[in-house]
Amino acid sequence: MSQPTQPPVLPWDAHNQKLVSNVHPSDWKNPTPAPRYNLVVIGGGTAGLVSAVGAAGLGAKVALIEKHFMGGDCLNVGCVPSKAIIRAARAAAAVREAAEFGVNVPTGTTVDFGKVMERMRRLRADISPHDSAKRFSELGVDIFLGAGKFTGPDTIEVGGQTLRFAKAVIATGARAAAPPIPGLKDVPYLTNETLFSLTELPKRLGIIGAGPIGCEMAQSFARFGSEVYLVEAEHGILPREDRGAAEIVLERMQSDGVKILCCGKDLKLAKDPNGVRMKVGSHGKDYDVLVDQLLVAVGRAPNVEGLGLETVGVEFDKKGVKVNDRLQTANRRVFACGDICSPYQFTHAADFMARIVIQNALFKGRAKASSLIIPWATYTSPEIAHVGLYEKEAREIGIEVDTFTQELSKVDRAILDGETEGFVRVHVRKGTDKIVGATVVATHAGELIGELTLAMKGKLGLKTIGGTIHPYPTQAEAIRKTGDLYNRTRLTPFVKNLMNRWIAWQRRHH
C-alpha cells in the first residue's frame, strides 16, 4: 500500500496502514454520479458524515466529497489520538501517586513513550472503520474521494466528474494556522496535525498557547517525563474558563512539572543547532529556553480555499463561511455546519449542527443553531466542563444570577478517591431555580456535566436536581448538593418562623 501525501501519515506502520485503508483507500474508485442529488456534502469530518448519513437514512440521494481523510480532525488528529495519550498519561500519574494509597511501586518505573504512541495508533485504527469510506458507501452514500469545487448554481466538480444538487452542505472544517510570532517561519514546529506522529519523547517541549489543546498536551507530556514550558499571552491558563476552575488546573499542572510562562510578552523564536530557542518575558522576568520540539497550539484557519464559493455567492471571511441561525449561507440552496462556520469547534457541536442542516435543507425546517445547548470539556487532570453562561457573561447581557458552589472536598466519594480538587458551580436566574450556566471541575467533569446539560435542555431547575436521588457514594452527589444549597435559600426567616410555630403547636396539642 502506498504512503499517502499531504500530509504524510507517520510512522508508516501496520496501524497507520490500517487507518488509511479505511479513511482514504488507495484503490477507491469514485462511483458514476447520479443524475441529481438531494444533497451533496463537501467534507468528511463529523459535520459532513452526520449530514450525509442522516439524510441518506431518511431516503435522500446523497453524495459526500472528501479530499483527504474520512473522519476529519476528530478521528485522525484530534479527539481520538489526544484522548488515548491523555489516558496513558493518567496511568503514569497514577503509578507515581500509588504510594498515597498504600501501593508500593518499584522505584525506577518509567514510561515507554514508543508504546504509548503505538497504543494510540492501534486504537485509532480500530475506531476508523466507523468513519470509513466503505461503511458510508454501504449506508447508501455515494463517496467521492478528491477535491470538490462549486462550478455552477447547482453543480460541484470532483475528480473530473460533475455532481448536480438540489441542496449542498459545506463541512470542510478548519486547520491549524501559524500565528504571527517573530521567528516562527524559520523554525520547525508541531501542530495537532503532526504531534501524533512522534515516536520519541522530547526531552524538552515548548508549547505556545494555554487553551485546551495546549494544556492537555503540556500536562500529558510532563507526566511522561518531558520538561515542558507552556507559554500563554494572557494571565493564567484556559482564558475562557471560570477563573477559579482554571486556577485549580494550573496548580495541578505545576505540581506535574509544567513550567507555565503566562502573561507572555515579546515572544521570539530562533533556530538552534540543538532545537528551538524561545525567548519570552513573563511576570517581569526574561526567559531564554532551548527546547527539542515546539508545539504551536494557537491559531485556526477555515478551509475555504479552492471551493469556488464565489461561484455560488457564498460569503466568507477569515472566520469561515457566513451562515444565518438556520445554518444557511447567502445562497439559500447552500448550507454549512461544523468548524467551517461555528464558534464552537467541538465534534459534538458539529454533530448537532448537522442534524439542523438535515431538517432545514431537506424538509424546509426552521430549526435554529442558537437553540442548541452545547457543553464542552477540557480533559486535563482534573477536567473542566462547562455549559451555558458564565457569571460574567450573564451579567453582561443583563441577567442577574445567584451562584451555588459545592466543593468536592465536602463530598464523601471525592474524599475517598483522593480527588478533592474541584467543585460544581451552578448559576441560576436570580430569585429562581432556572439554570443559566454551570461549571464542573473534577476528575471526570466531562461525564458529570451531562446531568446539568439535560436539566437545562429539559427546563428542570435546581429544585428538581436537589430532589433527585443519586447513588451513594458518588462524585455526582456534588450536583445534587447544589440543589440542596438552593433549597436552603428558600427557607427565609419568615418561613422558618412559621415552621417553628407549627412544630411548637404540634408539641403542645399532641
Image (cartoon, rainbow, N blue to C red):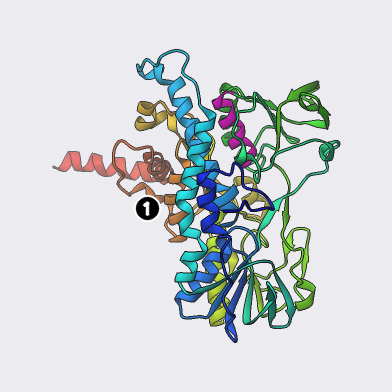
Image point 79% across, 73% down: which residue?
Answer: 310
Q: Is residue 73 above or below residue 474?
A: below
Q: Which residues are magenta?
A: 212-225
Quarter of the view holding residue 178: top right
Q: Is residue 165 visible?
A: yes
Which residue, as the protein is rendered here, is positioned at the far top?
A: 107
Disc 1 crowd, CA 10 A, few/some/many (<14, 14-19, 20+): some
| Circle 1: residue type | Thr
Quarter of the view holding residue 229: top right
Between residues 199 and 220, which one lies in front from this camera angle? 199
Between residues 342 and 292, which one lies in front from this camera angle? 292
Which residue, as the protein is rendered here, is positioned at the far bottom?
A: 35
Q: Is residue 166 above or below residue 11?
A: below
Quadrant location of the C terminus?
top left
Mark 1 lies on residue = 464
Q: Is residue 128 magenta?
A: no
Q: Is residue 498 left or right of residue 386?
A: left
Q: Secondary structure at mark 1?
A: helix
Q: Is residue 440 visible?
A: no
Image point 31% across, 44% down: which residue?
Answer: 470
> Residue 52: x percent and y percent?
53, 71
Q: Name the magenta segment's main secondary structure.
A: helix
> Residue 460: x percent and y percent?
42, 57
Q: Is residue 443 left or right of residue 218?
A: left
Which residue, as the protein is rendered here, is positioned at the far left?
A: 510
